[in-house]
Image: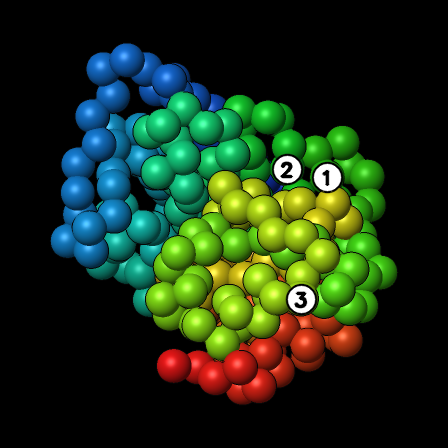
Amino acid sequence: MTAERPVDHEILSFARELARIGGDTAMKWFRSTDLVAERKSDDSPVTIADRTAEEAIRRAIATRYPDHGVLGEEFGGADADRLPRWIIDPIDGTKSFVRGVPLFTTLVAYQDADGIGAGVIYAPATGEMVSAAPGDGAYDEEGRTVHVSSCGSIENAWVMTTDPVDLSRREPGISRMLLERAGAMRTWADAYGYLLLARGAVDAMIDPIMSPWDIAPLSVIIREAGGVFSAIDGVIDDLGSSAVAASTPDLHRAIIAGRHDHGTY
């Protein structure tokens, strides 16, 4: 468990509710034959499912906590910097969603003046969920405690990444090291990979580029599940732009070291 702060079980429960609202709304379009994917300014895909799911989450927040800010992937928010606030990604893994792959998730985090107070990963197509609040541990969809594995070495580790091609381009040192040494590598990850890590099904997860709505819920979940979470350079940043998460400090250090030992360019 991480730093001590009072656990707000009402907030944590509502965060889970919001994730289900968003994920279950998105499911109405999953594997729809007429789903159209548009391109945003950063060339990432977006669909009516992304937008409608975020709108549903925003309505629920406005009804329950009208004074709270909201930062969402699809609509940003004029009140996005106001605390307390909710940080949401209605569909993390839109590329998987539009191809009918059921490993997309809905992400929800709550942030106040003390930092991230709750995080949820919900996979609506599989019914899986992991959630956490600082000092309270991490739990699955049945309320059972989840914990990372005890793997401490690259050679024995199952490592996941969202896009191995992108990892190789952005972080060739880590990519080369993992391909040479890792016990296994798997993809189709996005936030679902962090859900698997929190449950102990895989041992590490790495993404060279992330957004605040990705990082915010993942960081508290992995730490409360007993793992280690940082930016790719090893710096602790709960709203950063990259992520390395691992089951143990030894495994985390080994992955970070690979960036330097094998070169970053």
Q: How is the image coloured?
A: rainbow
Q: Earlier in the sequence, mark 3 or mark 2?
A: 2
Residue 118 vs residue 84, the one in the foreground: 118
Residue type, numbered disc 3: Arg
Residue visible at 57% across and 86% down in the picture? 261
Q: Secondary structure at mark 2?
A: strand
| Dot placed on the residue nearer the N-terminal end, 1 or 3 | 1
Q: Is residue 51 above or below residue 160?
A: above
- Proximity of marks 1 and 3: CB atoms separated by less than 8 Å: no
Q: Residue 236: image x %, image y %?
A: 56, 78
> Which residue is at the far top?
33
Circle 2 is placed at which residue position?
A: 129
Q: Residue at x 41, y 24 (%)?
A: 100
Q: Amino acid at mark 2?
A: Met
Write the residue at 59% across / 58% down: 205
Residue, x 36% and y 28% (percent of image)? 99
Mark 1 near mark 2, Cβ–Cβ under 8 Å?
yes
Relative to residue 194, is residue 106 depicted above or below? Answer: above
- Local secondary structure at mark 1: strand
Residue 117: which numbered mark, if any? none
Element on which disc 3 rests: helix
Label 1, label 3: how far apart the Cα atoms are: 31 Å
Task: Judge left or right: residue 149 versus residue 220.
Answer: right
Q: Position of residue 128 (x, y in %)?
A: 64, 32
Q: Is residue 255 left or right of residue 46?
A: right
For label 3, the residue is: 181
Which quadrant is the N terminus positioned in? bottom right
